[in-house]
Amino acid sequence: MKISRRNFLVEIVIGIIVIYIGVLIALFIFQRNLMYHPNENNYFGDKLEVEIENVKITTSDNINLLGWFHNKDLNKFKTIVYFHGNAGRLDNRIYKLNYFKNMDVNFLIIAWRGFSGNKGKPSEEGLYEDGKSTIEWLKNLGVTEKDIILYGESLGTGIATEIAQNNEFAGLILETPFTSMTEAAKNFYPYIPVGLLLKDKYQNDKKIKNINIPLFVMHGESDQIVPFWMGKKIYEIANQPKYSYFTKYDDHMMEFDENLVLALNAFIKSLN
């Protein structure tokens, strides 16, 4: 009887191990489906109140990226390059872009490969290539690094931070940044060895130390996706000059209210 019971317990343990290994294999294979959500659209019905031109940016691996370009005056004003997060189309950012119409700034927002109808599949290296190709596109118009402000939103902070390293851009804006994708993933999968399985790591905490241009970090304490402590840590370990806009009640998609817009505009004006 004891042997039978022992065998039963062994079978249960083996079954749990097999299931766990199966989960790990599935997560490894499908992890990019969990990280990138091009079809998840949270904001509908917003109407563009600022003039934009639809542009095509071709990457070095021949993927055409959709971009929205607002050219107020390239010679007079700096240009924001907006790198969006891991979900949704460009339309989902209209409510933010509309605020730029009253600021002395141009902007260019691109959709990542695999997003907004673009071909290709998103990956860390692929998105870095998308970001670098966008900067080259602007440079071909005569825009210099010192006239470019990098803006990263959530996942986009990983690309903005990568590109900003050891370069002389006008400034860097990080909205709800994470320390690394490994730490962010641990927040959702605490019992999974994400450090071993994760392909796209986006190590912002290591790269931020290589950035010496003006930095503006925005984050809300009520963020349910990227913990507030991550944004605060990025700010704390970053080099000067640096500025922050931290709020108590903002969730992951921050409220573009009067206070945020004033703080954002003040930072942009300080770069002129």
Image (cartoon, grey):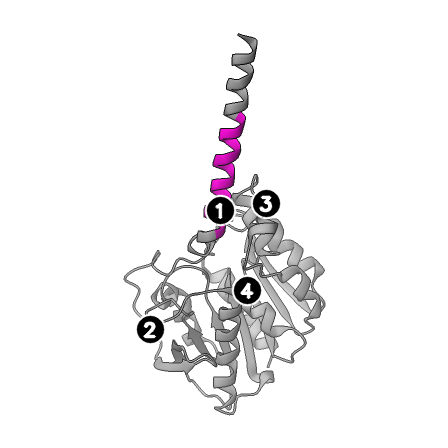
Q: Residues within 10 Å of mark 3 (few under 14, many from 20)?
A: few
Give the residue pinned by disc 4: 157
Q: CA distance from mark 1 to mark 2?
A: 46 Å
Give the residue pinned by disc 1: 25
Q: Which residues are magenta?
A: 13-28
Helix, strand or loop under label 4? helix
Which mark, by number, is residue 144? Answer: none
Q: CA distance from mark 2 to mark 4?
A: 25 Å
Q: CA distance from mark 4 to mark 3?
A: 24 Å
Q: Is residue 41 left or right of residue 142?
A: left
Whether residue 123 is in magenta: the answer is no
- Label 1 vs 4, first from the N-terminus: 1
Which mark, by number, is residue 193? Answer: 3
Helix, strand or loop under label 1? helix
> Which residue type does callout 3 highlight?
Pro
Select label 1 or label 4 by which is in front: 1
**In the depicted structure, whether residue 167 falls above or below residue 112:** below
> Which residue type does callout 2 highlight?
Glu
- Label 4 vs 3, first from the N-terminus: 4
Give the residue pinned by disc 2: 49
- Label 1 vs 3, first from the N-terminus: 1
> Which residue type does callout 4 highlight?
Thr
